[in-house]
């Protein structure tokens, strides 16, 4: 594990590595905690401010019923997430300029296919990434054009619910609509998806 600061290179000491391991363990246990909090009232459906969700909170009802703009195989469509309700959902925040985001698409598509509807992966391209239809449509990766994955774009709603400072960012939501974790890409594996898919 290396850290880069400016032009120099610094190797962490063993204490730093242990701390990172401990933090990762805490994240893992919080990710699949059994605690569930009550639904939030500040969903934004009535024009009120949308407050960020925390791990253990349930997504608001308009999470499922609000219409979003989807990129769909070279076209656009407006639809809700109602078809995904009742099954685990992983939201992947990404941008066209994020190399690691796009590199993960084939793997994500293959994993979603292997779960055959037991869980869903939805990509979210937020308005803050400054991407548009043209940039998405011109991507060399074919995962979106061939329908292997689906993405919401020009999003503001999800970015308010799950603020991020770096992408990719993954939000793990269980079948009851409770946020189980927010992670980077390193924790996304077939094993982790299987845990989420079978979590009750």
Image (cartoon, grey):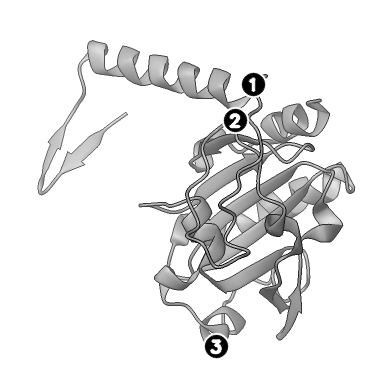
Secondary structure under the numbered disc 3 in the rendered image: helix
Q: CA distance from mark 2 to mark 3?
A: 37 Å
Question: Can see residue 176?
Answer: yes
Left/right placement of residue 115 relative to residue 143 reads right
Secondary structure under the numbered disc 1 in the rendered image: loop
Question: Can see residue 73?
Answer: no
Residue 35 disc label: 1
Left/right placement of residue 56 relative to residue 191 reads left
For residue 133, what is the image quadrant?
A: bottom right
Foreground tag (2 vs 3): 2
Expressed as whole percent of the image width and height from the top left, the position of residue 105 reads: 63, 58
Q: CA distance from mark 2 to mark 1?
A: 6 Å
Q: Local crowd at mark 3 within 10 Å, few (<14), some, or many (≥20)?
A: few
Label 2 close to label 1 by CB (< 8 Å) = yes
Query: Which residue, given by chain and number where applicable, does mark 3 sit on?
Result: 134
Instruction: Please say if 86 is above or below 12.
Output: below
Q: CA distance from mark 3 to mark 1?
A: 42 Å
Q: State which quarter of the image contains the C terminus.
A: top right
């Amino acid at each position: 594990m290396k850290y880069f600061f400016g032009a120099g290179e610094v190797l962490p000491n063993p204490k730093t590595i242990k701390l990172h391991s401990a933090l990762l363990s805490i994240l893992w246990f919080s990710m699949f905690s059994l605690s569930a909090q009550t639904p939030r009232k500040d969903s934004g459906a009535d024009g009120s401010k949308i407050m960020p969700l925390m791990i253990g909170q349930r997504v608001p009802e308009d999470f499922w019923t609000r219409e979003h703009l989807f990129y769909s195989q070279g076209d656009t469509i407006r639809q809700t997430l109602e078809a995904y309700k009742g099954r685990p959902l992983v939201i992947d925040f990404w941008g066209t300029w994020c190399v690691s985001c796009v590199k993960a698409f084939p793997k994500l598509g293959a994993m979603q296919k292997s779960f055959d509807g037991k869980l869903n992966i939805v990509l979210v391209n937020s308005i803050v990434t400054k991407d548009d239809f043209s940039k998405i449509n011109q991507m060399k990766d074919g995962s979106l054009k061939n329908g292997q994955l689906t993405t919401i774009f020009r999003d503001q709603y999800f970015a308010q619910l799950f603020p991020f400072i770096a992408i990719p960012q993954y939000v793990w939501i269980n079948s009851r609509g409770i946020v189980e974790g927010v992670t980077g890409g390193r924790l996304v594996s077939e094993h982790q998806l299987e845990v989420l898919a079978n979590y009750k």
